[in-house]
Image (cartoon, rainbow, N blue to C red):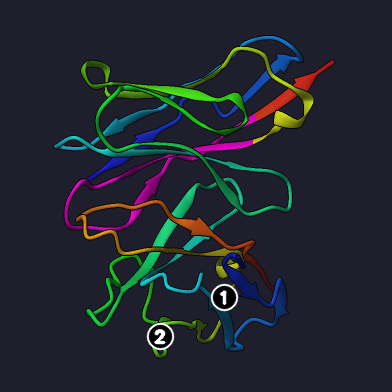
Amino acid sequence: GAGVSQSPSNKVTEKGKDVELRCDPISGHTALYWYRQSLGQGLEFLIYFQGNSAPDKSGLPSDRFSAERTGGSVSTLTIQRTQQEDSAVYLCASSEATGLAGAREQFFGPGTRLTVL
Amino acid sequence: AQSVTQPDIHITVSEGASLELRCNYSYGATPYLFWYVQSPGQGLQLLLKYFSGDTLVQGIKGFEAEFKRSQSSFNLRKPSVHWSDAAEYFCAVGASFGNEKLTFGTGTRLTIIP
């Protein structure tokens, strides 16, 4: 079946502009995650959605970052007033609900490469 | 808080030689452990995972990893590398209860020489 998809694949924007990044998880997966991969850095957790529960926003680096998930499926990550340090690859992942607590296998999308000029 | 250390930023191996990539984790209980591979321009692909049970786990593409609780390690191994194994490898740890997020190491870039 289809994997996790993300759009756009590349986004170039000017400093100060707002951007929206989209993620379509695997059908039936109730958990959705956003990570950021900066040059020379590992993957940094941003936010996590699980079903109808309140999202875990503990990884968002500033209040310029927000995310929503509509209808328990598609998610949009919004970065307002972009800064050059926001340049990175933004990865989305999804996982299914196994009934077990804790971390589960996450399936990653190809990412969106954001460049802020 | 959980953390992962991958001490080798870059490793070069000859094709056909054996490979071991190191991963050390920090977590207060039995962790869930993962190895992912990222080829240039590609997304992350899961190689293998450890949740419980046998401490030697087999993955795809001929990879295996061994969970050693006493050393807080989860090293990735392959007996004979192929040129197509050149990629970036990430070790990750997840909580065995509660928190869903994965904490990743900074990655090891693998170069294969003929």
Is B45 positioned to the left or the right of B12 in the image? left
Q: Is residue A96 visible?
A: yes
Closest to the observer: B27 or A88? B27
**In the rendering, at what x and y percent does residue A100 appear?**
21, 55
Identify whether B91 is placed above or below B54: below
Closest to the observer: A20 or A107? A107
Amino acid of disc 2: Glu
**In the rendering, at what x and y percent does residue B98 appear?**
17, 57
Q: Which residue is farthest top?
A: B17
Q: Secondary structure at mark 2?
A: strand
Magenta residues, start to end: B88-109
Identify whether B90 is placed above or below B11: below
Displayed quadrant of residue A8: bottom right
Crowding at label 1, few (<14), some or many (≥20) Cα neighbours within 10 Å? Answer: some
Name the residue at 23% across, 53% down. A102
Foreground mark, 1 or 2, reads 2
Q: Earlier in the sequence, mark 1 or mark 2?
A: 2
Amino acid of disc 1: Gln
**In the rendering, at what x and y percent does residue A90 appear?**
56, 66
* Residue where numbered disc 2 is placed: A68
Q: How many marks?
A: 2
Whether discs 1 and 2 lie on one chain: the answer is: yes
CA distance for labels 1 and 2: 21 Å
Q: Which mark is residue A83?
A: 1
Identify whether B86 is placed above or below B95: above
Crowding at label 2, few (<14), some or many (≥20) Cα neighbours within 10 Å? Answer: some
Q: Secondary structure at mark 1?
A: loop
Q: Chain of mark 1?
A: A
Name the residue at 29% across, 38% down. B51
Name the residue at 66% across, 28% down. B110
